[in-house]
Amino acid sequence: MVKVIVLFIALLPIFCFAQNKPSLKDIPVDVFVNGGDTNISDVFITSKEAKTKVKILFDQQQLAHELTGVNSNFQIYWEAFSSQWKWIKFRKNDTPLLLFTGLNSYTDEREFVEIYDPEISDSRLFAEPGRLIAFKKHPLTDELILYTHQYPCCRYASHNIYTLRYIGKQIKSRDRFFVGRDAGDMVGPFFPDSVTFDGSYNILEKKTILRWSPKVVEKNAFLERSNTNVIISYNEGAIYKVLAKQGEWRYVIMFNGISEEPSAVINHVNFKNKGVYGWIKSEH
């Protein structure tokens, strides 16, 4: 353990110099996950085999973590990161998978969520910045579904909510997008106090602006980035779901119909079929 502590102290000046504080890490989970359980530890499985299986990944150089590499010592790595490794099962009869969560480097303040199958040669099934925020069990199959929140660092404001399922020996992911920062340089609020999930969908009757907060802001909405709080427009006929109502404003998720126009916070090319959260003025 002494070696790890000494190494951490040696790297501390680099760590402090290199980092830009992540923004808006804590979000209201129930806004994005309908009926999700936030007691994440409930999905962890205890097993004495974790160390042995992680060493296989380490020796095969499949880990892109601090303290790994050709000349690294596994025992030093394990002393530093052992608490971040868990086992999970997506279904009762599935092979257990290794789950890594948290910081994987002394020079990066972003947390990571990584899933590995140590029984196959290409072990890494999923690896993205973010934190586990909730899970659900499928009501018919009892399948485990995981939800992660990928938050921004530096001067960015982009967030993604990933839904993870294990299908056909692969992790299948779907993500939805929103923007926001808690550094005081971006006008909020970004979320409603609560949301209501139902099965109904709406269709835009006219081209409509999607904003990141429930107001019309024309100056200093995002300092040094955008005067307005406009995310982008959506065209007539776009499909969306209303999650909350606040006066004349509706908190929605847009599913399609994005307008091909410039935006300070989003590139329409990447969002033609990706859900985007935001606020619109009521059409009625």
Image: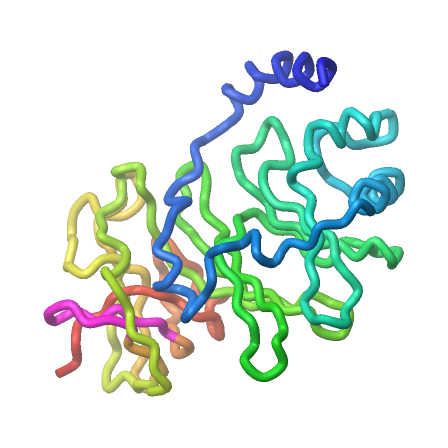
251 falls in the magenta region: yes
Find the magenta span and give its range.
243-254
Q: Is residue 282 left or right of residue 91?
A: left
| Residue 236 coordinates in the image, percent (x, y) | 29, 83
- Quarter location, residue 181: top left
Give the colouring mode of the picture.
rainbow
| Residue 244 coordinates in the image, percent (x, y) | 24, 71
Q: Is residue 4 left or right of residue 216?
A: right
At x 68%, y 56%, the residue is 126
- Quarter location, residue 68: top right
Q: Is residue 36 left or right of residue 78?
A: left
Which quadrant, please, contains the C terminus?
Answer: bottom left
At x 57%, y 18%, the residue is 14
At x 63%, y 74%, the residue is 143
At x 75%, y 57%, the residue is 97
Q: Is residue 114 above or below residue 258?
A: above
| Residue 25 coordinates in the image, percent (x, y) | 41, 44
| Residue 280 coordinates in the image, percent (x, y) | 22, 70
Q: Is residue 73 above or below residue 136?
A: above
Which quadrant, please, contains the N terminus?
Answer: top right
- Quarter location, residue 24: top left
Secondary structure predominantly adopted by residues drawn in magenta: strand
Residue 244 visible at all? yes
Residue 61 visible at all? no
